[in-house]
Amino acid sequence: MNRIAKFEKVSKERFIADWMDTFGGDAGSAETVYESVKLPKRATKGSAGYDFYSPLKFTLHPGETIKIPTGIRASMREDYVLMCFPRSGLGFKFRLQLNNTVGIIDSDYYFSDNEGHIFIKLTNDSNEGKVLELEAGTGFAQGIFLPFGITEDDEVTELRNGGFGSTTA
């Protein structure tokens, strides 16, 4: 196996700011959540996906959405991308979906002003009326590192600074 990446926690200050911006509350509560953030891990030797663990307990009724600051960032080789998906079982049972269908974490996102903080926005798209209840510390998404190529005539020299939509004019 190629070892091409590493997961880290964002700084405590970054997480607290992002948590409070997303959910409100106080810095002390956000700090408690930060201390419980677990780095993504594979479940088995043959797993391709690294499970992302929810930093909070939440309930999603059909049609409801939640944006989760994971507290995680990923450094990776320049020729790799981290693709994020819902955990297979949650997608199968609840039609749990990422709002952007597949999360794409580029290698240069790590260097953004927000420290490359990975957010995952989910929707319970159940058409069977199923309510998703997830405990804090439970795997809810998975990330897979994949190599990618560029065209022979690619001449891009721009640098990233930001997340969603930051590279479009």
Image (cartoon, rainbow, N blue to C red):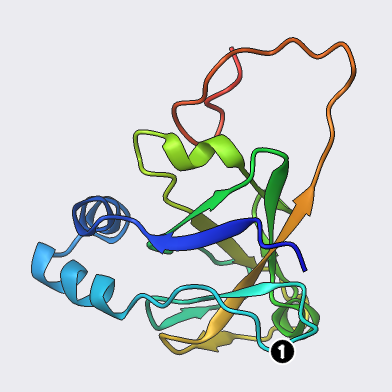
**Above or below — where is 131 with respect to 39?**
below
Residue occupying the far front of the picture? 2
Q: Is residue 125 left or right of residue 160?
A: right
Residue 166 percent coordinates (x, y)? 52, 26
Name which residue lies at 72% across and 53% down.
102
Q: Residue at x 58, y 12 (%)?
A: 169
Name the outermost residue toward the right: 152
Quarter of image, res 9:
bottom left
Left of 153 or right of it: where is 12? left
Front position in the image: 117 or 164: 117
Taking depth in this image into account, of 31 and 39 the one nearest to the observer is 39
Q: Is residue 19 above or below residue 94?
A: above
Task: Please tell me whether mark 1 sits on a helix, a strand or a loop.
Answer: loop
Image coordinates of residue 91 in percent, x first then y, are 75, 76
Residue 141 drawn above or below residue 8: below
Residue 68 appears in the picture as rendered: no
Q: Position of residue 152 (x, y in %)?
A: 90, 17
Task: Report the number of numbered marks.
Answer: 1
At a point 72% along the width and 39% down the height, the residue shown is 79
Q: Identify the residue under disc 1.
A: 44
Give the image quarter of residue 106: top right
Q: Amino acid at mark 1?
A: Thr
Q: Residue, x 41% and y 85% (percent of image)?
A: 136
- The local crowd at label 1, few if under 14, some if 14 to 19, many if 20 or more residues have their Cα within 10 Å, is few
Where residue 155 sits in the image (x, y, percent)? Answer: 74, 10
Front-lying residue, 25 or 29:
29
| Quarter of the image that includes the N terminus | bottom right
Evaluate whether residue 64 shows in this view: yes
